[in-house]
Image: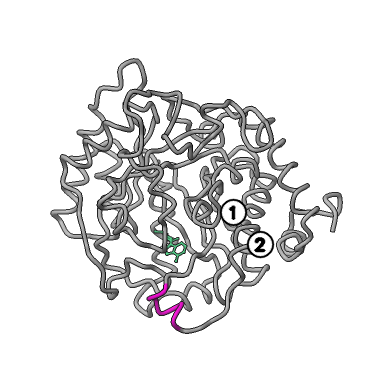
Amino acid sequence: MTLSELTLDREGLAAAIACEDAAFEAALREEAYSVKVATVGPEVYLRGLIEISNICVKDCLYCGIRRDIRCQRYELSEEEVLATARIAAHRRFGSVVIQGGERTDAAFIRKITRLLKEIKSIDTEDDPPLGITLSLGEQSREVYEEWFDAGAHRYLLRIESSNPDLYRKIHPADHSYDRRLQALYDLKEIGYQAGTGAMIGMPFQTAEDMADDLLFYKEFDAPMVGMGPYNPHPETPLTLSGAPYPSAERRFALGLKMIALLRLLMPDINIAAATALEVLDPRGREKGILAGANVIMPNITPEEQMVKYNLYDRKTLLRDCPSSVDPSKRDTHICRNCVFPFCSLGDGLSGRKIVIGYGRWGDSKHFRRK
Ligand code: 5AD
C-alpha cells in the first residue's frame, strides 16, 4: 500500500492498519507529523502525571491493579499530591493529570475536591495556574460536576474498545459499555474537554476494530485522545487465558500508526504520546511525537509509589521521577537521563525542531474553536 492509496473511511483505515510495510508506515508517520505542524504547530505540551492511588473497585481483565489482583496498594496523602504538583509548577509543565484507580466512596470524592482547589492555588509565578486533568474512572454526573466546579477542566476516560463485544470480552460481566459511554457524554455536557482512547494490539482485536476506534473518536468529537499499545501483565486473566496478541514490535508500530492515522482524521486535536509506548521503546514517546502526537505526560509520581502503579511492567518510566531530576533546572531540561533529548538539544531523533510549550495549558485547538 502507498500513501496516495490511503482513504480515511473504515475500509481504508483498516487496510492501513493491517499493512505491515515499513516504508508505508514511515511515510504515514512523516505525513502525520507535517499535518500536525501545519495545524496545531510544532509545540509539545506537558502534563505532569500524578498517580495518586492504585486502589481500584474495577476488575478489568487486562489491568495489573485490578481489584482482585494481589499487589501492594498505596494512596498518596494530600500533602504528597500537593508537593508533587508543586514540582510540576516549578518545572513549568503547565498542567497536571491526577490519575488513579476508580473509587466512588465519599471520602475519596471529597479528597479530590479539596485537592483540586489547593492545586489551583499553587504559586506558578508568571504562568497561569496549573491546568488540571482528571483520570479517575466512571463517576456519577454529580461528582463530575463537583470536580468541574472545583477546578478540573479536562477528563480522560478511555473507552478501551469501541466494539461492545470486545469490551465485554476484556471486562467482567458487571462492567458496562453503555455506562462508560454515558459517562463520556456526561463529561462533555458538563463542559470538560473529554478525552478518550483505547488499547492497541489486544487479544481478539482486529484491524477493523482499530479502524472503528478511530472513527469513534471522530464521532464523539473528542478534543483529546490518549491511546496506547496493550502491554500484557503476567498475572491478569487476559494474559493467563493464553489468548494471542501481536508481538511487542508490532504493537509498537501499531501504536505509532494509530497516532498518525488519527492526526490525519482529526488534525487539530490533542493526541498524547502514551506512556505505554515508552515501555516498548526507550524513546517511545519521542517517536510518538514524530508520528503526530503533541502531548507528553511525564510521570512525576514519587518513585516509591510509581513502582506500585503496575498496570504492566513500567520500569523505564522511573527516568521521569522527581528523584532523577536535577532540581536546579527549571524549564530547559527534564531529567538527567534525558528522557526527552529534544528538550536540551532542541531537536529530536530526526533533527527536527521540537518546541516544548512550557508553562501553558496547551488546550486542544479543536475544543477552543467550537
Ligand atoms: N496494557 C496497556 N494499557 C493498560 N491499561 C490498563 N492495563 C493495561 C495494559 N495491560 C490502561 C487502560 C486504562 C488505563 C488506566 O491503563 O487503557 O484506561
Q: Which residues are magenta?
A: 234-240
Q: Which residue is mark 1?
A: 219
Extreme residue in the top direction = 126
Quadrant in which the N terminus is drawn = bottom right
Above/below status of 62 relative to 240: above
Question: Which x, y percent locates residue 79?
Answer: 15, 39
Q: Residues within 10 Å of mark 2 (few under 14, many from 20)?
A: many
Q: Is residue 235 rendered magenta in the image?
A: yes
Element at badge 1? helix
Extreme residue in the bottom direction = 241
Looking at the rendered structure, the kind of residue marked 2 is: Ala
Element at badge 2? helix
- Tell which circle, 1 or 2, labels the residue nearer the N-terminal end: 2
Q: Nearer the viewer, residue 165 or 5?
A: 5
Ligand 1 found in image quarter: bottom left
Tag of residue 211: 2
Between disc 1 and disc 2, the foreground one is 2
Q: Is residue 52 rendered magenta in the image?
A: no
Looking at the rendered structure, the kind of residue marked 1 is: Glu
Tag of residue 230: none
